[in-house]
Image (tube, rainbow, N blue to C red):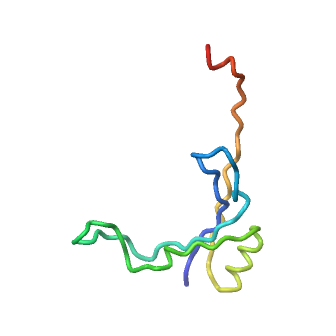
Amino acid sequence: MPTARIYQRPKNAMQSGKHRTDLWQLEFEPHEAQRADPLTGWAGSGDTQGQVRLGFPTLEAAKAYAEREGIAYLVVPAPEKTLKLQSYADNFR
């Protein structure tokens, strides 16, 4: 039985915007470890489910899909957002 994790997309650290952070992702857990290719040295495996990422508008939709398809899942809660409040003058202290 395939296993997956459902999580909410985090904000991109390189951008200030929050585009698509309200979407939920279903991502399959790897079934085999990656190994280095002897010719190129690149890491890879025969597990093609590791390439699959499904997006859902809500957590309930992602759970319903996993249950309908018989996929065992683990919901990873989104980390709490903390604001670091400071004034512009704090840069010069």
Picture residue at 75% right of the left edge, 68% below the top? 57
Figure quadrant of residue 77 = bottom right
Residue 40 place in picture, x, y as percent: 25, 68
Above or below: residue 60 compared with residue 78? below
Residue 18 place in picture, x, y as percent: 70, 51
Above or below: residue 82 compared with residue 92? below
Number of numbered discs overlaid on the protein picture? 0
Residue 28 place in picture, x, y as percent: 55, 74
> Dividing the image into 4 quarters, which one contains the N terminus?
bottom right
Q: Which residue, as the protein is rendered here, is positioned at the far top?
A: 93
Left or right position of 15 against 20: left
Q: Which residue, as the protein is rendered here, is positioned at the far left?
A: 39
Picture residue at 71% right of the left edge, 63% below the top? 23
Picture residue at 27% right of the left edge, 71% below the top? 37
Above or below: residue 76 compared with residue 48? above
> Dividing the image into 4 quarters, which one contains the C terminus?
top right
Instruction: In this rendered view, identify the residue nearer to me: 52 or 80.
Output: 52
Picture residue at 66% right of the left edge, 86% below the top? 69
